Image (tube, rainbow, N blue to C red):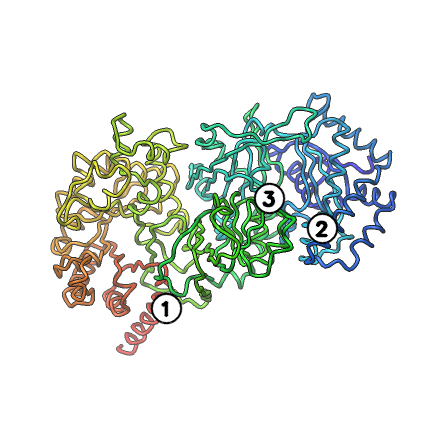
Amino acid sequence: MRYIKFFKELNNKNVNLVGGKNASIGEMFQELVPIGIKVPDGFAITSEAYWYLLEQGGAKQKIIELLENVDATEIDVLKIRSKQIRELIFGTPFPSDLRDEIFQAYEILSQQYNMKEADVAVRSSATAEDLPDASFAGQQDTYLNIKGKTELIHYIKSCLASLFTDRAISYRASRGFDHLKVALSVGVQKMVRADKGSAGVMFSIDTETGFKDAVFITSAWGLGENVVGGTINPDEFYVFKPTLEQNKRPIIKRQLGNKTQKMVYAPRGSEHPTRNIKTTKKECQSFSLSDEDVLILAKYAIEIEKHYSKEAKQYRPMDIEWAKDGDSGEIFIVQARPETVQSQKTKEESQVFEKFKFKNPNEKKEIILQGRAIGSKIGSGKVRIINDLEHMNSFKEGEILVTDNTDPDWEPCMKKASAVITNRGGRTCHAAIVAREIGVPAIVGVSGATDSLYTGMEITVSCAEGEEGYVYAGIYEHEIERVELSNMQETQTKIYINIGNPEKAFGFSQLPNHGVGLARMEMIILNQIKAHPLALVDLHHKKSVKEKNEIENLMAGYANPKDFFVKKIAEGIGMISAAFYPKPVIVRTSDFKSNEYMRMLGGSSYEPNEENPMLGYRGASRYYSESYNEAFSWECEALALVREEMGLTNMKVMIPFLRTIEEGKKVLEILRKNNLESGKNGLEIYIMCELPVNVILADDFLSLFDGFSIGSNDLTQLTLGVDRDSELVSHVFDERNEAMLKMFKKAIEACKRHNKYCGICGQAPSDYPEVTEFLVKEGITSISLNPDSVIPTWNAVAKLEKELKDHSLTAR
């Protein structure tokens, strides 16, 4: 056939003939299907057919005339001309020989699947599409559940006409593509019955930070257009590539989306071939993929990325659409294209750490709304709510676009915006991809944004605080910090980072660092679990619990309270451990005080009223107590899961507030019973050196444990007898006190005697350069800092070490 190519005849060298999308499907058919990756079969109507149609009908010259002198930024004019061109294409009849070939190919495909008339997807594939530096995501149309020759011809014509939507014209113009040098091929691909299963998008790279070692998967019930189009908030999963390839099961994050609707087949004869129906309560509260499905998809992503990188002779992260057949349970890849934002950063750009931050970080800001952050920038301005495309021309440069759902039709408008906010959508929808490409901060899935905000309202949109994006009332000044990483000198003293929020781990891992000196378990419990651990233990044992309904809502998607607690903790720790792998990540087990635990859901039933919680029921003393022991065992199970099931053996354990040697032995026994034993698979177990007794009996503690991490906050409080929360004596609290320096010195010397690790993870080095200098001179193993202190402290340590070395050489 002259104008038809089946997928098995195509590969990535055929972009000019069948466009990026169809060439890529052919490539997978030839190279990846043989190794077990499933791809639905089909055929491409070539770009030659497109030119044949336009030239036979005389449409090409008319299109040239209609596009002459059109400014893509003049939205009203663009709308009129694009509509005229689409009507022109749609009204041009197919030449009979082309029509016959299409019917013949459709019959062959139908017979292949033992069907009289196969249900197919009709997808556009432009010859300039899916390039490494321009995704063209969503710029042309796709139609699902097309069946029969009449429908097929109608929707192929619709696909061809979609090359000239106003959004597509604007997109090409903004990227310098000549409209009459871009042709459209149409792919006709057998449908996967995802209407009975699930579908979505995945990336072989983290879309926000460019972290290369994670596969990011989004998923929802039904056909994938709701995920791609951003009309629902999907489930999200992260899988860590390196240990997946070691046959581990490193699902380091699961996040349940609301998935309020799903796209299914419409009855034959309906106005549209698909329709959306409401999901059931059970579907809303269940993950749309099993863990096995997630791991299969992640393995597919790795293989696809490897193949395309090898072919391109350079690293090539991928943007992949997938579908799970609800009848057979099989998972198929339906599209794969190069990722177009993170992969385009030059080597020079990757050597610059760029961080958006508020000029006055301590200034109190009112959070109005929050959702999923796209990018890592901050934008501010006046709100402009636009509910339909007809009113796009009212949008002014620098305003903040607020709408229900920013599909790619909004691209001309988005380019003018200082930020974008939508009611709906996930981080892999078309609009999110376009927002990243044009560099506009966006927050998607902000439920009720169009109701809560109003046109003219002044707000600030921050995507610079992790995966969660925040909308603040008012305008707040921000600045951009840029640091040349290539100029950083290596240090002998290890520089670690303190982290409490797993959502920031991928971003922080791009700072210069040697690992994580303090990952705070209690922050993960506070932010990920939100319920008192003992409330979950009681729920698990079918006991009555206060605030039961709120707690059960948090558990949606997990099998039971224990499954929720263990997996959520493991995901939080796993995210941090993966971000810094294979560098060490030291996890401090939970160290809430009773007054802090009491504020958690259900907490009032389990906590005593203590006069001084800082010196009370906290740290190691909880772990072996009869009332808390089971909750701590769950915590240990989560840590063991990270090391054993996820394969993240860079994770180490640290015990806080250990008062006696006897306590130490009891805690070690609990850890051992839960598969956490010093030396096993490289595990090291440290203690926080934060009580004077830890320094006084350092040799005894170090005979049990693998090292110290000095907690300067509590150690100063207890050495100087100062309540660190009291402003009345705050002037006495000072880590530079001579007694504190002697404490630090004794702890370091003890670790040196036993040839064991000694770090510091308290606030002192972040606040006082002279403390850092003292610790370096004493030969501490590592200094762990808040992220904002890492770069200045690193440079200070490098300079000091050089001075000490030069002085030593001179002294000789």
Q: Which residue in the protein does label 3 denote?
A: 307
Q: Residues within 10 Å of mark 2 (few under 14, many from 20)?
A: some
Asked if 454 appears above or below 293 in the picture, the reply is below
Q: Earlier in the sequence, mark 3 or mark 2?
A: 2
At a point 41% along the width and 49% down the height, the residue shown is 579
Residue 707 locus on image (x, y percent): 23, 52
Asked if 330 appears above or below 724 in the picture, the reply is above
**Residue type, label 1:** Asn
Q: CA distance from mark 1 to mark 2?
A: 55 Å
Secondary structure of the residue carrying numbered label 2? helix
Q: Nearer the viewer, residue 183 or 749?
A: 183
Q: CA distance from mark 1 to mark 3?
A: 40 Å
Q: Quadrant of the N terminus?
A: top right
Q: Which residue in the protein does label 2 denote?
A: 79
State the mark number for residue 795.
Answer: 1
Q: Earlier in the sequence, mark 1 or mark 3?
A: 3
Q: Residues within 10 Å of mark 3 (few under 14, many from 20)?
A: some
**Residue type, label 3:** His
Q: Quadrant of residue 683?
A: top left
Q: Nearer the viewer, residue 43 or 804?
A: 43
Residue 599 locus on image (x, y percent): 25, 43
- Report whether 562 appears left or right of 193: left
Q: Nearer the viewer, residue 656 or 541?
A: 541
Q: Quadrant of the C terminus?
A: bottom left
- Report whether 84 appears left or right of 723: right
Kindly indicate whether the residue at mark 2 contacts the one at mark 1 (C-beta within 8 angstroms). no
Q: Earlier in the sequence, mark 1 or mark 2?
A: 2
**Residue type, label 2:** Lys
